[in-house]
Amino acid sequence: MYSTLPKRLKAARLKNQLTQRQLGVHLGMDENTASARMNQYEKGKHSPDYQTMQRLAKVLDVPVAYFYCEDDLLAELLCAIAKKPRAEQEKLLKLLSDDNNLLPSGNCSG
């Protein structure tokens, strides 16, 4: 099964101008194994657990959901919105909710 995680992890790492080794060390991995472990994540051979994903998201300054988002545009929107202050996020949600009732109030399920 295809996973977006490897692709998004590599893109976020490169955007932050980090090597695989540097990123692994930032996460607290041993310097001798950091590069190999990050490479396995980026190749999709192994998947990090959720706590590691939270640490990756923090180091790379992206929301955890970014790594799992299947749609490229939506992934970029997630990043852009996540960088906004909470009050602006709430305004955006209200704007989208009010725009012809595109989004139901309070949830995505409709």
Image (cartoon, rainbow, N blue to C red):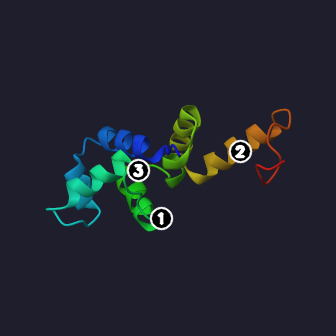
- Which residue corresponds to the image point at 31% horizontal and 52% vertical from the top-left? 40
Which of label 3 and label 2 is nearer to you?
A: 3
Amino acid on which disc 3 is placed? Asp
Q: What's the amino acid at mark 1? A: Tyr
Nearer the observer, disc 1 or disc 3?
1
Compared with residue 48, is residue 97 higher up or lower down, i.e. above or below? above
Q: Which residue is drawn at 51% across and 43% down?
A: 2
User: On residue 50, which mark appears?
Assistant: 1
Q: Name the residue under label 3.
A: 61
CA gap, disc 3 and disc 2 = 21 Å
Q: Closer to the camera, 55 or 35?
A: 35
Determine the CA span between mark 1 and mark 3. 16 Å
User: Type of residue at label 2?
Assistant: Leu
Check contact, mark 3 vs mark 2: CB within 8 A. Answer: no
Q: Are marks 1 and 3 in contact (CB under 8 Å)?
A: no
Question: Which badge, 1 or 2, comes first in the chain's sequence?
Answer: 1
Image coordinates of residue 61 in percent, x first then y, are 40, 50
Pointer 3 or 2: first along the chain: 3
